[in-house]
Amino acid sequence: MKPEIEAKFLNVNHDELRAKLKVAGASCIHPMRLMHRNMFDYPDRRFRDAGTRRLLRLRDEGDRVTLTYKDDGEGSYSHEAEITVNDFKVATQLLQEIGLELYGVFEQKREAWHFGDVEVMLDEWPWADPFIEIEGPTEPAIKAAADALGFDWADAKFGGPNVVYREKYPGMTDKDSINALSELLFGTELPEYFKERLQAKS
């Protein structure tokens, strides 16, 4: 599996960042769009219960459908293996037919920009504050892009969307995960899961 080198910066004003990207000469790969993801696991919950973050994700990105396995391993960056498939619904059925369980249906919104050697993703998730993800071939390339856009590397976060939700809902521990939810969708009521974790720190 290839390493996925990326860093997140939380609580970002996307409009202000778009202006910086334009001034810096970045180009928009695609504007903000809704993406759907189905999350799969074995019946023994080996991904959800793993000591490190592991996942199997089928994602409809609007212009393509990807099937991705990720493993955080021991370092700051995760490793991933990804293929493109041609049908979201059929791929979901295939994975279920071979014994995998569909445990989560999630949505996200993403806008992508090309900036030098890196890609900058503007992300929105239900019931979380806007954030960005900078992905590139090396850590120095990501650091340089972050600095050019006015971000402090000391504020960088690493990992999946759980790091975003733990910032928003401080009652979430390192053992808590959005994988405990069966749905995470825009336009729905704040899940009890998050309400409880707000109260835990109030």
Image (cartoon, rainbow, N blue to C red):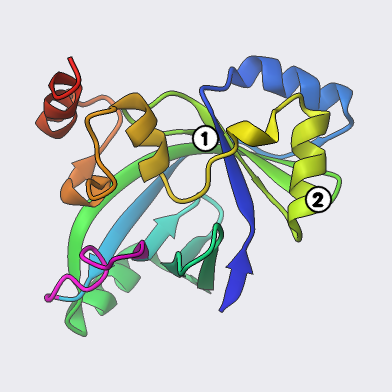
> To which residue does mark 2 refer?
141
Residue at position x 56%, y 53% from top? 63
Q: Nearer the viewer, residue 34 or 162?
A: 162
Q: Where 149 falls versus 46 (above or below)?
A: above
Residue 201, position as x, y percentages in the image: 20, 21
* Gap in angstroms between the C-alphas marked 2 and 1: 20 Å
Q: Nearer the viewer, residue 108 or 168?
A: 168
Residue at position x 64%, y 16% from top? 15
Range shown magenta: 43-54
> To which residue does mark 1 refer?
123
Q: Which quadrant is home to the N terminus?
A: bottom right
Q: Which mark is residue 31?
A: none
Label 2 neighbour load within 10 Å: few <14, some 14-19, many 20+: some
Q: Where 31 falls versus 84 (above or below)?
A: above
Residue at position x 22%, y 46% from top? 176
Residue at position x 17%, y 49% from top? 180
Q: Specify the amino acid type for callout 1.
A: Asp
Q: Where 21 falls versus 80 (above or below)?
A: above
Q: Secondary structure at mark 2?
A: helix
Q: Which quadrant is home to the C terminus?
A: top left
Label 1 neighbour load within 10 Å: few <14, some 14-19, many 20+: many
Q: Nearer the viewer, residue 39 or 193?
A: 193
Q: Is residue 6 left or right of residue 200?
A: right
Q: Specify the amino acid type for callout 2.
A: Ala
Instruction: Give the mark, 2 or 1, whose residue is nearer the N terminus.
Output: 1
